Amino acid sequence: MPGLVEVAPLPPVPLHDLLTYEVPLALRDGVQPGVRVRIPLGRQVRTGVVTAFAAEPPVYDTRPILEVLDADPFLTPEMLDLARWAARYYLTPLADVLAVVVPTHLPAAPHERVARLTRRLDAAELATLERRAPAQARAYHALVAAGGELATADAPSAGVRPAAMRALVTSGLVEVVARERALIAAPEASPTTPPPLSAAQRAAVAAIVGALDAEGHASFLLHGVTGSGKTEVFLAAAEHALARGRGALLLVPEIALTHQLLDRVRGRLGNTVAVLHSGLGPRERWAEWRRIRSGEARAVVGARSALFAPVERLGLVVVDEEHDAAYKQEDGFRYNARDLAVVRARLGKGVVVLASATPSAESYHAALDGRHTLLELPERPTPQPLPPVTLVDLRGRPRGAGPRLLTDELRSALESNLACGGQTLVFLNRRGYATYLQCPACGNALECPHCSVTLTWHRGARAVACHHCQYRRAAPSTCPSCAGQALEPYGVGTEQIEATLRACYPLANVDRLDRDAARRAGAQRRILRDWLAGDTDILVGTQMVGKGHDVPGVTLVAVLLADLSLNLPDFRAAERTLQLLVQVAGRAGRGDAPGTVCVQTFRPDHPSLVAAAAHDFTGFMRDELERRRVLGYPPFSRLVNLRLDGLDVAQLDAQAQRLASTLRAQAGSLGLGAGAVLGPAAPPIERLRGRHRRQILLRHADVRSLRALARHARAEESALRRARVRLAIDVDPYSML
Ligand code: ADP
Ligand code: ZN
């Protein structure tokens, strides 16, 4: 019906997807699928995207559209198709998908409003605030953590509630001022010429270029060891796509860590490169989006959500480090950008290249099955081969002074590397000074009041903090439950390792890169710049240091405790551990000098460690796939995780049980067998941000039956809501926590 359209309101309305509106005669010429419009909603006026003409009038009285915002469709038919595909596959309302696809609005003024602390509270005042107004205390901590100033637009993502902020303003502790918005200037990169490619690189480029020339859909898995020149391969492919008049999209797990790559891409492809990532403010994001939409930028580099960049005639999509969990969105519209990249390329008849030194089991299996063409780069083209990896067995060591993780073997490797002037990367995937504080008298360990986890001690900040919510408080000097003894620290984090290494090697430049160190504006760039320039002798860090950097001076990589990721209750634990170890180890020996790697573990016989030491990804994956096949885990089955949460645990349990038995009955009538519905069970973190959690896992080899089953769960959503239980459907889940 031409007079009626379906509109996805932005932001979406819970439990509604699309709403039907009337198009007044005066606006009929301007309205078509893909344009943005202003619509009345209750007593508000909102923006929305027209998704289609309505097939039939709805049961409710329709209201008219107020205004059309775009002369040309804001979303192309291809993007709408992709969004619809994603909504169906991920069982997510189309409006929720479009909320991720469409960038936030252009802000009206070039100024942004900033909330600024007028003074700091002393300990007594802070304690009072924490007791009387915890939300305000959280807002206060967020402001302190942000260096005393926070753009009001960024406040919600920092966990600050608007009401709490208003209350702080009223009390005079915070003032709101206007500040000139910082624009990220696109640095002019100097043009670079590629090195002469190796035979393996040339073969890979030829395969991709051949597929681009054929103008049809093709998909590749580019498996090359760390430093094998994968980037050179996909840059050459992107040049070819652009030369043929097609667009190119390059996805990376995390832009903030990838300045180096950005420079390389700009150097090769020039001004036609646009960059999209979550660190951009609404204005920059919008400016980049417009450059892409207008065709001025035809190559896009970006993180996860850049998958939805409006590149026209998209010829090539590259997903770098395709195994990385950062491609999986873990709230709201829970999509995997790697998987949607393959879909986007297929819908648009383009070529997709998934690249990694450690491909995911899913992608590797697909390549062995012939669904992706496998391209391999087995060697580094640079002077040094892959570094030798030594395993250090941590078992049965007496407890001496200082952290046990700084073993004699590690110290002597570190000292000889320092003596040669080499840089050392020390990797420990755990932030803070100590993992938890415990009272030796009563045994009480400090826990987060909102989550079922212990609080991490951040000694430098004199605070304990929850790594799952915003909770933070001053570190108590005595046990709060028996008020008797001083608390004792357990479990070593990066902060403690950094402090110990500084004390042991006072002449060395020791630095640290993790989310705490990177919190202050500009700190991350500074840390990485010093590291790249060779000024840092020892860099201690979490997985932030494991990714992507190409630092020629690194000749020693030390993994302090490889077992951390191995002990997670997740069927992907072995795969993840191998990926992490190979990636971190791959930072060594990338320059002219050879590198070595030292990996400490309590489980030197574990397949992930054996394979990491032997650089045997292929052998590991062969065994791992066999194990997954026997146990019926992905990629040999598909999973849908139904995540339920609620404030009342009895209510939650009752609803979870009811949902599980409904689904078991449905599974029976669909003929799916008894094993298709598992649970309900409590996830490892039973309570998060004050809400109890349960999960029901749906598992089956046939994805269509599985989604049919999950649709039944979706249909139960309003009944669950009435019982104050929330449901999130996670299709192809990546995290089981
Ligand atoms: P990857 O993406 O596989 O980690 P890169 O493309 O970043 O590898 O290459 C690693 C290093 O090797 C870079 O410094 C790059 O400039 C260099 N390199 C890549 N290909 C060649 C080549 N054919 N000859 C010489 N150096 C190369
Ligand atoms: Zn918490």
Image: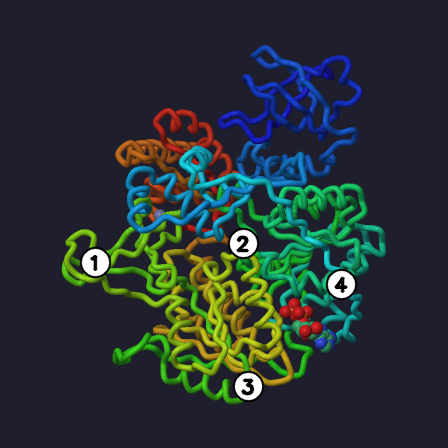
Q: Could you tell me which secondary element the residue under label 3 belongs to?
A: loop
- Above or below: residue 392 compared with residue 649: below
Q: Name the residue that disc number 1 marks.
A: 478
User: How far apart are the two marked residues, 3 and 4, measured between alpha carbons?
Assistant: 30 Å
Q: Amino acid at mark 3?
A: Gly
**Could you tell me if the residues under marks 1 and 3 are in contact, i.e. CB atoms within 8 Å?**
no
Residue 421, which numbered label? 3
Q: Name the residue that disc number 2 marks.
A: 326
168 lies left or right of 651: right
**Could you tell me if the residues under marks 2 and 4 are in contact, i.e. CB atoms within 8 Å?**
no
Question: Around disc 2, counting alpha carbons within 10 Å, would you say few (fewer than 14), some (14 to 19), or many (20 or more)?
Answer: some
**Could you tell me if the residues under marks 1 and 4 are in contact, i.e. CB atoms within 8 Å?**
no
Q: Which quarter of the rendering shows the N terminus?
A: top right
Q: Residue at x 67, y 63 (%)?
A: 261
Q: Amino acid at mark 1?
A: Thr
- Above or below: residue 288 compared with residue 222: above
